[in-house]
Each structure stands twice: as structure tokens, then as C-alpha cells.
Amino acid sequence: MATAPPPTTRPRPARRAASGPRWRRWLLLGLFFGLGYGLTQRLLEVRWGEGSTRAPAFKPKSTPSGTPLGELRQQKGDNSQPLAADLEELARQQREEKEKQEALKQEQTQRQNAAIEEEKKSLESGRRRLEEMGNSQEPLTPEPTTPEVPQLPPPTPPPIEQPAPPAAQAPREAPATTP
């Protein structure tokens, strides 16, 4: 019997780790789509010829407020003279406002400086008082005094008593002895 050749054992190629997180792919795809969309919009808005009848890309939202120049000239009555706006009056008012604000700032600064000086003076006077109290001979707080102990005369020893002479005693009798 013929034997079959052994199966070839080829090593399987190891799976390569993903080249990066999946979000990178989606980010790149989104970037390309956004770029394509933006370019398409730009190309559609470009005017290719000077004779284009398209309206400009911007439109005024509303008419400007205020009095038109024509009405001002009619009110003035003289078309040849340029209209003198009240710029001088506005400049004067702005200067006055600025001067008022500067005066208020200076006043506040002076108040703050005066308060600081007053505080410095009070601290200095307090420091001087403390130095004077420290230099004075009197103690700051009275020390507790104890009453003086009266002097007692030195102790005298009690008089020595002479021991009393022993009383005459009768001779003792010897105990009786029995034979």
C-alpha cells in the first residue's frame, strides 16, 4: 500500500495587530469627506465670469438707522456747505466723563492712602506704648503678694526636769523555795 505524504505543516501567518485604533480610520474618513464637501461648496460659489448676474453673497439685514444725508442737507438748507457734525460736542462730553472718572479714581486713591496712613499711625502708637511699658520699671501686671509671715522668737527648749529620786523600796522578798 502506498502511503500518502504527510500533510505539510506550514506555519500560519500570525495575525498582525491592528495598525491603530479603529477610531483613526473613521477620523481619516471623516476628514476626507469634510474636505470634499468644503471644496465642492467653494467651487459652486465662485463667480467664473465678470458678467455674472448672481447677487452678492451678502445682503444687508436691515436698513441702517439714523437720518440719511439727503434729509440732513434739506434741513440745513444749504447744499454747498459740508455738514458740521457735532463731533466737538461729543468729544467735549467724552473728555468731561473721562475727567470725572479720573477725579473719582484719585479721590478713592486718596481715601485708601489716608486709611493706610491712619492704620500705620495707630500701629506705631501701639508699638510705642508697648515699648514704653517694656522699658518701665513697674511690672505690667501686679505680682501676687503673700502676707508676711510674722517673726516668731526662736524656740526655747523646755526646762529639763530632774528625774524624781526613786522612792525607797523595801527589799523584795525572795520567793519561797520548796525543797
Image (tube, grey):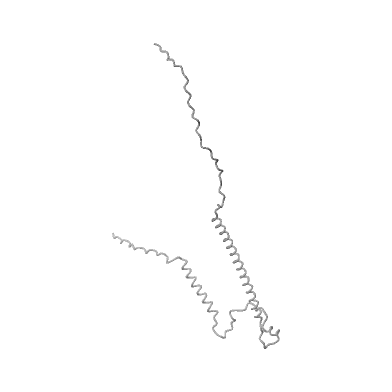
Q: Is residue 71 left or right of residue 143?
A: right
In which quadrant is the C terminus drawn? Answer: top left
Q: Is residue 9 left or right of residue 168?
A: left
Figure quadrant of residue 94? bottom right
Identify whether 157 is placed above or below 123.
Answer: above
Figure quadrant of residue 68? bottom right
Tally the marks: 0
Identify whether 37 is placed above or below 148.
Answer: below
Figure quadrant of residue 119? bottom right
**Nearest to the observer: residue 80 or residue 87:** 87
- Residue 8 image point, x, y percent: 33, 62
**Nearest to the observer: residue 79 or residue 141:** 141
Identify whether 1 is placed above or below 65.
Answer: above
Furthest-bottom residue in this view: 80
**Nearest to the observer: residue 106 or residue 51:** 106
- Residue 66 image point, x, y percent: 67, 79
In which quadrant is the N terminus drawn? Answer: bottom left
Q: Is residue 64 left or right of residue 34?
A: right
- Residue 14 image point, x, y percent: 38, 63
- Residue 82 image point, x, y percent: 66, 86
Furthest-top residue in this view: 179
